[in-house]
Image: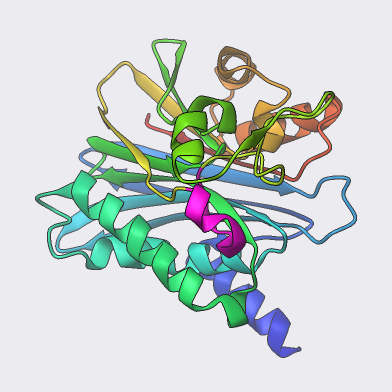
Amino acid sequence: MSGREILHKIKVKAGFTSMTQDTGKGKCKMSGKQITHGFQLIKGKSNHAMEDYVVAQFRQLRDKDLGLFGIFDGHLGHDVADYLQVHLFDNILKEPEFWTETERSIRKAYNVTDSTILEKVVELGRGGSTAVTAILINGQKLVVANVGDSRAVLCKNGVAKQLSVDHEPSMERQYIEDRGGFVSNRPGDVPRVDGQLAVARAFGDRSLKKHLSSEPDVEVQMIDDGTEFLILASDGLWKVMTNQEAVDAIKNTKDAQSAARHLAEEAVSRKSKDDISCIVVRFH
């Protein structure tokens, strides 16, 4: 077995994964509730290698049960997304105020991680990555953060609720222009920062960093009896499905892995050409 194959097996066992097509699941009992998760990745139609990475794992820390879920969608190469899947959650949990100032700690860890990525440009290249992360604490408190256009959607009493913010260049034009950049609007194309990147916030992207933010939006949601499941997915899914369509498609699928697979395959059937990565977390 090659060194690369051994490394992949270690990553999969730890809850990190990226392949042409990969799937997995897990479960944990938190506060008397059986929490389950499943994930699915499908490579898109592009000629480059798969650029999505997924983290889906349960961890116990300081006698607290944690669910750690994240999707990292790389661009101009996959090295930054790969780095994030290994290091971002550890950087968040190492923050000394994580348990008392969770939102603040996540924002700080996102920014510290981005600074480290920029310092490692020779090693990681000049590409970048979006991210959406969700931390479930004792099955009761869910903290979602994101930069870019990967999205978190919660299903509560059958209704979809978006917990993340799609950081589109057109929505953050003023910020970009105030820092000396511009947003292009070419016919037949989406708005892009400096005519290049289709998101206004991302990790890495050294050449655009003066005009690009890595500040996350953070949302806290308490998990109650009406909270059914969470979907995290890259834009390969959301380009072809609305939030409510995604929720409706899996609301009767009790197995989280089957639900994630169904969403990814539905996106392919709707002609999504992008890499597709999806995590479903069920709270009951």
- Residue 284 in the figure: left or right of residue 238: left
**Residue 25 visible somewhere in the drawing:** no
Which part of the image, by quadrant, shows the N terminus? bottom right
Front position in the image: 229 or 129 = 129
Q: Residue at x 72, y 80 (%)?
A: 5
Q: Residue at x 79, y 50 (%)?
A: 43
Q: Is residue 229 above or below residue 92?
A: above
- Residue 146 in the figure: left or right of residue 98: right
Q: Is residue 55 above or below residue 153?
A: below
Is 163 contained in the magenta span?
no
**Residue 118 visible somewhere in the drawing:** yes
Measured from the top left, where is residue 158 in percent x and y? 46, 10
- Residue 236 in the figure: left or right of residue 30: right
Q: Residue at x 49, y 55 (%)?
A: 210
Colouring mode (rainbow / by chain / secondary structure / one colour): rainbow
Measured from the top left, where is residue 261 in percent x and y? 69, 37
Q: Is residue 45 above or below residue 163?
A: below
Front position in the image: 77 or 91 = 77
Residue at the farthest left position? 100
Measured from the top left, where is residue 248 in percent x and y? 59, 13
Q: Residue at x 56, y 71 (%)?
A: 11
Q: Which residues are magenta?
A: 201-212
